[in-house]
Image (cartoon, grey):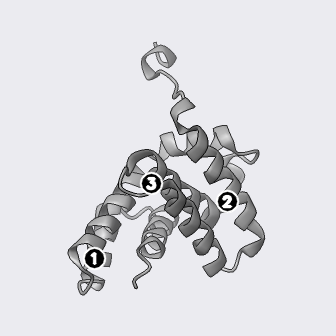
Amino acid sequence: MTDTRGIVLDILLENENNGTFINRIINDVLDKYAYLDRRDRAFIGTLASGTVERRIALDFCIDSFSNAKCGKIKPLIREILRLSVYQILYMDHVPDSAACNEAVKLVSQRHLDGLKGFVNGVLRNIARNNEKIVFPDIETQYS
């Protein structure tokens, strides 16, 4: 079984750390993992590009449900939260419980076990309350 979310996490970290265009990173990674089946490759591409595309909305959501603001969260944990919140809010075929559980597994795999409770708590809170999230009205904010 391939760790598709781990691959996406590495893509997001490279994008964040090096500023490399997300499409270039995704294409390079999908070339590297050409042996993956079509569904896994599509999942990786959709999750990585969607997380970057909606980064501002994801950060707003994380900031709304976490005591620690995105800018203060370790980059690795921030990216795990972002990719997981993207799944909760925008990927209807991924159960919220799977997004939360896989995020906690990623935290553990990256040897940050002390933050599993934080990640789980933030994500479960978002999953329980995602219908109540009210994003700011851009037109009102910038007029």
Which residue type carries mark 1? Leu
Residue at the image point whose x is 71% and y is 67% from the top: 116
Q: CA distance from mark 3 to mark 1?
A: 20 Å
- How many badges with numbers are in the image? 3
Q: Quadrant of the N terminus?
A: bottom left
Q: Secondary structure at mark 2?
A: helix
Tag 3 or tag 2, which sits nearer the N-term? 3
Q: Dot 1: what SS? A: helix
Where residue 49 appears, x then y in whole percent? 35, 57
Bin the neighbour count of mark 3 within 10 Å (Cα to Cα): few under 14, some 14-19, many 20 and up.
Answer: many
Disc on res. 30: 1
The residue that disc 3 covers is 87
Q: Gap in Å between the C-alphas at discs 2 and 3?
A: 14 Å
Residue 16 lies, with reference to residue 124, above or below; the image says below
Q: Residue at x 49, y 58 (%)?
A: 83
Q: Which corner quadrant of the image does residue 31 belong to?
A: bottom left
User: Which residue, given by chain and number where applicable, does mark 2 sit on?
Assistant: 119
Give me the C-alpha separation between circle 1 and circle 2: 28 Å
Dot 3 or dot 1: first in sequence order is 1
Question: Would residue 2 be found to the left or right of residue 27 on screen?
Answer: right
